[in-house]
Image (spheres, coloured by chain):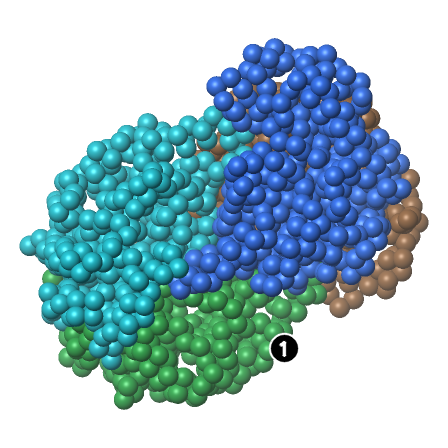
Chain colours: A brown, B blue, C cyan, D green
Amino acid sequence: MDSRISFSSDYTKGAHPKILQRLSEINFEQIDGYGTDHYCREAADKIKKVCGCPDADVFFLVGGTQTNQTITDMLLEPYEGIVAASTGHVAAHEAGAIEHAGHKVLTILNVGEERDTERYGDSIGKISAVELKKFIDSFYADESHEHMVFPGAVYISHPTEYGTLYTKKELEDISAVCKEYKLPLFLDGARLGYGLMSKRTDVTIKDIARLTDVFYIGGTKVGALFGEAVVFPKGVTVKHPIPVIKQHGALLAKGWLLGLQFDTLFTDDLYFELGKNAIDKAEILKKGLIERGYKLFLDSPTNQQFVIMPNDKLAELKNNVGYGFWEIYDEKHTVIRFATDWATTEQDIERLFEFL
Amino acid sequence: MDSRISFSSDYTKGAHPKILQRLSEINFEQIDGYGTDHYCREAADKIKKVCGCPDADVFFLVGGTQTNQTITDMLLEPYEGIVAASTGHVAAHEAGAIEHAGHKVLTILNVGEERDTERYGDSIGKISAVELKKFIDSFYADESHEHMVFPGAVYISHPTEYGTLYTKKELEDISAVCKEYKLPLFLDGARLGYGLMSKRTDVTIKDIARLTDVFYIGGTKVGALFGEAVVFPKGVTVKHPIPVIKQHGALLAKGWLLGLQFDTLFTDDLYFELGKNAIDKAEILKKGLIERGYKLFLDSPTNQQFVIMPNDKLAELKNNVGYGFWEIYDEKHTVIRFATDWATTEQDIERLFEFL
Amino acid sequence: MDSRISFSSDYTKGAHPKILQRLSEINFEQIDGYGTDHYCREAADKIKKVCGCPDADVFFLVGGTQTNQTITDMLLEPYEGIVAASTGHVAAHEAGAIEHAGHKVLTILNVGEERDTERYGDSIGKISAVELKKFIDSFYADESHEHMVFPGAVYISHPTEYGTLYTKKELEDISAVCKEYKLPLFLDGARLGYGLMSKRTDVTIKDIARLTDVFYIGGTKVGALFGEAVVFPKGVTVKHPIPVIKQHGALLAKGWLLGLQFDTLFTDDLYFELGKNAIDKAEILKKGLIERGYKLFLDSPTNQQFVIMPNDKLAELKNNVGYGFWEIYDEKHTVIRFATDWATTEQDIERLFEFL
Amino acid sequence: MDSRISFSSDYTKGAHPKILQRLSEINFEQIDGYGTDHYCREAADKIKKVCGCPDADVFFLVGGTQTNQTITDMLLEPYEGIVAASTGHVAAHEAGAIEHAGHKVLTILNVGEERDTERYGDSIGKISAVELKKFIDSFYADESHEHMVFPGAVYISHPTEYGTLYTKKELEDISAVCKEYKLPLFLDGARLGYGLMSKRTDVTIKDIARLTDVFYIGGTKVGALFGEAVVFPKGVTVKHPIPVIKQHGALLAKGWLLGLQFDTLFTDDLYFELGKNAIDKAEILKKGLIERGYKLFLDSPTNQQFVIMPNDKLAELKNNVGYGFWEIYDEKHTVIRFATDWATTEQDIERLFEFL
């Protein structure tokens, strides 16, 4: 149908063929529902092992918005909100799912806003421990804070919506502030595989398990048909998580479809291999863009690359290549996004370069 | 793993092989997200054609609870509740998802309760137009009804949770009451394929499209990996359905996974063929049960069969066959459910009979 | 304006004159807002003393629906519902306020329904410990209870919506079941003063404080302009009650208006005296009704009296006396309610008798 | 008790004596509940007349948070948020009541932030039509806006939280943008009386009724014991407002308490007279402050005056005078608020001056 090459996003393709193959193999096995099956158990065990958190609770949900909504609602008291960067996905692009569940998103500056002299550095999209502490302190310093929304948890995405990454030191600092104020730290890893395999990260999945209270390992964008593996490294604190998940419409009847996919992704390091593919291709892409004289909007270390594209060039490109519109840069330029993924090939990049 | 034969439910297996095959075929096609793709359009077109409702709006959601929650919330004003049988799925088994979205389920007697002299007839699980009208009239007759929850929509399931079916006349009567009071009629068709192919129904999918305001065609239990096709035969009334779906966590990023499945199910009448298989096998099962002297709990015309099983027999059965616990019948008997499905074979039934 | 005598309800008049007098006296005193003032403290101290619960937390809210909604929401986890009699106010007459806050009302039979041979005895409107335990046990016995709404707290009203009263033994039994299952017991005392002063009760306010986890002392219907004093005898369990109250729109800016009223009501036993007045007048009313050949619908021990009134008599009565419509009794009779209150006089009763 | 003079806020005193007097006069009149009484009707008629909107619907609610929550929820679809200044009361000081009802507050710059060169002018706290239009346009220009929260209504406060006022031209411009995009305009008039009587306003109550879709006339802060009169000048659009109000816990049983108060306030222009008193006293206060060398934080035209107070002076003041803490100005100064009200006397001001 759509024979154009597309770099519009990292969720435009199906799943790694091993997943489809295993789905076929077990198609007529009769399996118990709602995540109580052995595939879910095995996937959870593999995840707990790779994360180094044997006491974790692992749940498999279907998609990102429902995961962000369900976890946020699990973490917060009704009078609490979740602290996030103003550019965070929960703040901007969930169609109000967080508020629909009754909670305010308390936005703080993202690091890009803080340091506006170097606006398009590799820090845009992140929050800082300093700004976080300042926000919490000023909340409690306000004598009328009982009339305001309490900070109840902290949300970060890694990679962020701009493809940027926290350093281990930054995560440790944020985690320390969270511990100090007893606020659970929630890391949205919808693109976690791409973050972990960046050439420019010192953060491992074990670090994330150690430093956060809950995070999820994105499958939808990293080689699965769909699915997000939610990990509570120290165990889930909600007494009855299953009804909570169900009342958010997030309990899949055939839960094993999720278990099987994550079991496959966490066998023989497939998840990391898929992450690496997108990173390798993004490096080639970035290099080629620079060589061709294109200016990058920011220096992203992951699979999303943002380019300041002349509008006349863009008009031409549109017919041949799928890309993501990001924002207006100036009268003559537009920022667009190219995303590589777990299945991008060198040929794909070369075809793209033909149009650039 | 679980090599026992199981009749515990109709969502224990994967999907019809044609679906898996097509998923493999299009695996690397790059497709737009969130249901805006051509597979969703084609599936919707086929559904609109088979339902005889060219002006319909069709949406593809992932699972039953999320579909029931999202539709209910679309239909109701905040001060309204949904009228349902006391045995209806929304009343009893959604972990409070309806209330979580802010709405009361207004339960009325199911026909089984109404006619208690013939309690276990084939009407249990249904509501009646008479009882519905009585309920609405008595609401408006109450002078303080502005202090009560307004009936805002009517929910029926077809087949019901007990496998029973409405007749065309019954549906017409309920639909007429709904029209009289301007209440949208919502039909939960999680097992619709099995209802439509019953030997004992005069209701077609066109009747349902004609008589309801919204219904869904269950995929999860009838041959799909997952997925429910929501049909608003006269068009959806909510101005912006996409953000509503998204804020319920029900907007799948790779929406085409749903479109493709329903496109397959509604090609060459596959959906109906799969429904028929379960019905045929249920007939054989029922006949065999009666021949073997088992007493049925009710005379179900669809794929769910309910048996009053002696407890000693049950203890023995448990090791060999999966079944669904339904309820305690008396001190010495238990009601259990055997469900056939789109993939049940005669051999499966024969293996079951070996243990009975 | 409305010079007819009215017995339609117990919230048709202003407040005891002492309350108005004190409001005038302190009118220009400048007082801190939101319940942080000394009147609230003094009222709370008096209430804690009369209830024998020095460790209680006391909050003053404005009206019944908001109190029921706020307390219920404080007690429940999101996946929990509140157990109540099918006739309970939270089940039937809050316009869905409980569901609006996300919670299901889990209705069990009221004792009137249980014992239908003696339907109109003095037990209608109550729940029983036996039925409560049966409900909870059957919930946990259901293997799929994680797909249902968990019982999270128990609601009773005393007096009930039918004016009936629990005995001390009944309260102790219900409280014991609640303790066994760790469910907080919530007693709606919108008419508590009338219950406590009934000639036919062995329940004291100290018993209520001992046996419940939260209850409220109704002011609106018992001598205050408005206001309900919420008492958590063992302390409130929510960490930050003020924002919870505020986000339910229930935190009055001039909180002292509530504190002053309850301080007045709990000075020199005024609250009990006002309760007694309504009871004494109800006794005269009931005696007079029986003498005049009227048939009571049930034998209410409190200020609400229910009469089975011939419809022709009713048509005549309507022009002269305000009453509450209750329900259709049969073709020729209607059940109506006469409510006495804290200010009802013997002359009022005599005027009523003139029309009977 | 607290014999200090206080200017901490405008809700520290009871009500105008005429209100207390009338409450006493009608104390034993028996009146129908829930706002169906003649006092509410008469008050509504007077308000409709003074506002020049004979087709208006008027409701009387108890307090500000509940009014903001209830109206917002009435105006919005579930997927919509309310646009407000970042300093707006609904954005900052409702303990999350708006989000608790499921809606996001979409904050835009307040005019003070926009024009930061003149930060402390008389525009802080307001939004501008230009910024509003820009916000809405950029929302619809974003291709993924169906994944974001739709702007569904616009909230302004008049006077704002900083005491500032819109000009008639500014209101007309904002109203025009709202009309263009079919967004209802909601004006929070918690302190409306003080805004209308400012010496520096060209906005009348008729202008407000003409230019907004809903506004409320604050009673709590302007001479009533409590109460806010909500006016929908063109009629309310929700089909059943009473259950909506009730399910927000905002339907007062003795609704006439509100009706009577507003009837009194809108008899012989009392409401305006009370507003004028606060303004006159604020003028004296401001003049005196300037004469005594104090620096104002902004040039407020209403009853709230903000002063940049040296911290050493403040330490001394604290023992003698109640004031409102506003914010830290710099290391040596704090911004505090003095509010005059409907009952402030020249003697009060003089006593304050003794300490300054």
What residue do we see at 47% from left, 83% from top? D55
Residue to which mark 1 is pinned: D180
Q: Quadrant of the C terminus of chain B?
A: top right
Percent x, y of residue B96: 51, 42
Nearer to us in this view, B191 or B242: B191
Percent x, y of residue A201: 66, 34
Q: Amino acid at mark 1?
A: Glu
Q: Is residue C224 visible?
A: yes
Side of D139 where D90 appears, left or right: left
What residue do we see at 49% from left, 84% from top? D210
Q: Is residue A268 visible?
A: no
Nearer to us in this view, D222 or A106: D222
Side of C100 where C61 appears, left or right: left
Q: Quadrant of residue C329?
A: bottom left
Q: Quadrant of the N terminus of chain B?
A: top right
What residue do we see at 71% from left, 32% from top? B303
Q: Residues within 10 Å of mark 1 (few under 14, many from 20)?
A: few
Percent x, y of residue B16: 81, 32
Q: Quadrant of residue C259?
A: bottom left
Percent x, y of residue C274: 13, 58
Q: Secondary structure at mark 1?
A: helix
Determine whether C291 is above or below A184 in the image.
below
Circle 1 chain: D
Determine whether B145 is above or below A177 in the image.
below
What residue do we see at 59% from left, 15% from top? B314
Nearer to us in this view, D86 or B116: B116
Exactly how many numbered labels are in the figure? 1
Determine whether D195 is above or below D256 in the image.
below
Nearer to us in this view, B30 or B275: B275
